[in-house]
């Protein structure tokens, strides 16, 4: 528990310094996450948007308010694309469950594309507020989906990362006890994914 | 356990340890059973870097196929045990074929995932197969080659039903050593192969409907098999074991194919 706290604090500190975050999900054919990872890259990020979130009162970043602001941010972003577009980066966009929802919501876009496009790597397939969604669809198991939420374009790095993730996933799937619905809990898998994320994202 | 560890003079403990002592340890009677000097000697004799750790699944190469072939006779033995085991637990031929199909399905899932990785992971833009006929061709050649070491003998399309396709194998290697009793002449143990084919087509989204039911169970427990195996001995008796794998497509798949044309 103490280690988790320390990690959270780290994440919080990194967030303050505007580290670029990536959210990675492996979704099963029934859309349940089998594996998820939040990666904070140390690479410099160009400053986008204002620091509106720091001016908001603390209650507005609570879980529920976060959902509301994230969702209302979406509508305001589409309506006032030129005027208010810069300020949509609000606290809600970083909430865990909102991230999860954005990832799952992008499945609609992914499934539409993958029916007619045979490419496995679908880059920038969906957008939501500040998030760009890229995906990778494997061939087997009724299409396992790897989804990554990122803030800046990094097509080549993500492609290399997806390739690594694919190889690791295929190795996992070779385990006779693994099914398309088994959550991936291997520590080795996790550390390899983190290493690849650190290198490529 | 705590007692034996606390008291090394326990007679039972010493009996155990002397029985498991290696010859090197006989030379130094004072070394305890769990002492480390034992390990390097095993290490040097076996020549493996880490004797205690089996290679992790993530450390192994996916494309090393040279040493991965299994002897046909040991496979035949294993498969006969599989069939016998299954046969004891079923109520009829249909049930038996169904279960063999399920076992094959588990293999097909992995064959597909692995085959696509082997062919596509090195390409610049990896592709999935979304058209049916190329997928069928790749089953006929690549999947058959990966599983049986040779391509299948023919692909046929049903004349009566436009949603039925067939893959024909004149001499299926897995049933080469199986003779079916007369009263079970309906049975085809190639249902196992049918399961592999079903998994591959299902993985690519061709057999069952695109939308899965939201259950944790694999699809084949919920829906009847759409890929079945049938004995079709050739007329001239040249191939008594000739087997046809019959694929019945979902209506929505045929409609999708029309749209993609």
Image (cartoon, grey):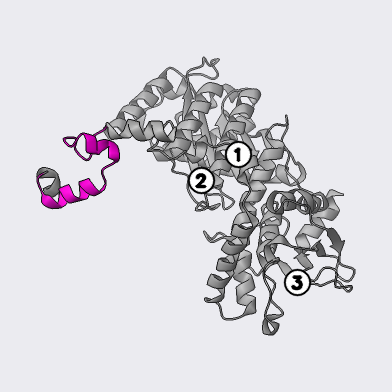
Judging by the rendered image, the residue that carries numbered circle 3 is: B230
Question: Element at badge 2?
Answer: strand
Q: Is A102 in front, or is B79?
A: B79
In the rendered structure, does residue B20 fall within the stretch colored magenta? yes
Instruction: Rate crowding at label 1 as few (under 14), some (14 to 19) or many (20 or more) other CA atoms within 10 Å.
Output: some
Tell me where residue A196 appears, x and y as whole percent. 53, 27
**A158 on left or right of A182:** right
Q: Nearer the viewer, residue B236 or B205?
A: B236
Q: Which residue is mark 1?
A: B62
Which stretch is magenta?
B9-36
Secondary structure of the residue carrying numbered label 3: strand
Q: Quadrant of the C terminus of chain A?
A: top right
Say whether residue A61 is visible. no
Please give the chain letter of the residue carrying mark 1.
B
- Count neighbours of disc 3 (C-alpha within 10 A) and say few if under 14, some if 14 to 19, many if 20 or more: some
Looking at the picture, tell me which residue is in the foreground, B229 or A78. Answer: B229
Instruction: Say whether residue B18 is left or right of residue A24.
Output: left
Residue assigned mark 2: A33
Work out how far the residue at label 1 is from the one at label 3, CA to CA, in angstroms: 33 Å
Image x and y of residue B220, in percent? 61, 64
* Residue at image coords 62%, 51%: B70
* Tag 2 subunit: A
In the rendered image, residue A106, in percent from the top left (x then y), is placed at 61, 41
How far apart are the alpha carbons under marks 3 and 2?
A: 39 Å
Which image quadrant: the N terminus of chain A? top left
Q: Which residue is depicted at the point 29% across and 41% down?
A: B22
Q: CA distance from mark 1 to mark 2?
A: 25 Å
Q: In the image, are marks 1 and 2 on the same chain?
A: no
């Amino acid at each position: 528990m103490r280690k988790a706290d320390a990690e959270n604090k780290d994440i919080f500190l990194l967030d303050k310094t505007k580290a670029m975050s990536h959210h990675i999900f492996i979704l099963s054919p029934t859309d349940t996450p089998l594996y998820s990872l939040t990666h904070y890259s140390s690479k410099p990020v160009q400053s986008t948007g204002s620091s509106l979130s720091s001016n908001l009162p603390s209650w507005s970043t609570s879980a529920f308010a976060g959902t509301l602001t994230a969702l209302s941010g979406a509508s305001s972003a589409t309506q006032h694309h030129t005027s208010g577009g810069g300020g949509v980066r609000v606290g809600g966009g970083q909430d865990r469950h909102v991230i999860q929802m954005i990832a799952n919501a992008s499945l609609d876009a992914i499934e539409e594309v993958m029916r007619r496009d045979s490419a496995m790597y679908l880059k920038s397939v969906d957008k939501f507020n500040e998030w760009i969604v890229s995906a990778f669809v494997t061939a087997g198991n009724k299409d396992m989906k790897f989804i990554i939420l990122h803030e800046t374009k990094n097509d080549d790095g993500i492609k290399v990362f997806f390739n690594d993730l694919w190889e690791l996933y295929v190795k996992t799937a070779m385990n006779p006890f693994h099914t398309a619905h088994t959550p991936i809990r291997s520590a080795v898998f996790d550390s390899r994914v983190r290493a690849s994320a650190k290198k490529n994202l | 356990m705590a007692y034996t560890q606390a008291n090394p003079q326990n007679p039972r403990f010493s009996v155990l340890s002397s029985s498991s002592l290696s010859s090197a340890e006989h030379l130094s009677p004072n070394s305890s059973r769990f002492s480390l000097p034992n390990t390097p000697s095993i290490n040097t004799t076996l020549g493996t870097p880490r004797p205690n750790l089996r290679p992790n699944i993530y450390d192994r190469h996916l494309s090393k196929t040279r040493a991965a072939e299994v002897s046909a006779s040991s496979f035949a033995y294993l498969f006969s045990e599989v069939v016998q085991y299954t046969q004891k637990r079923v109520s009829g031929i249909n049930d038996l074929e169904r279960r063999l199909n399920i076992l094959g399905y588990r293999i097909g899932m992995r064959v597909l995932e692995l085959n696509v990785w082997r062919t596509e992971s090195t390409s610049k833009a990896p592709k999935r197969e979304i058209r049916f006929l190329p997928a069928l061709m790749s089953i006929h050649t690549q999947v058959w080659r990966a599983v049986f070491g040779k391509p299948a003998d023919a692909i046929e399309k049903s004349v009566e039903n436009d949603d039925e396709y067939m893959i024909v194998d004149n001499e299926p290697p897995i049933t080469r050593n199986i003779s079916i009793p007369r009263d079970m002449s309906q049975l085809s143990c190639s249902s196992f192969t049918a399961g592999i084919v079903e998994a591959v087509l299902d993985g690519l989204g061709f057999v069952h409907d695109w939308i899965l039911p939201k259950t944790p169970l694999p699809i084949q427990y919920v829906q009847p098999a759409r890929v079945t195996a049938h004995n079709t001995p050739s007329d001239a008796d040249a191939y008594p074991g000739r087997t046809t794998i019959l694929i019945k497509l979902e209506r929505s798949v045929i409609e999708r194919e029309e749209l993609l044309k």
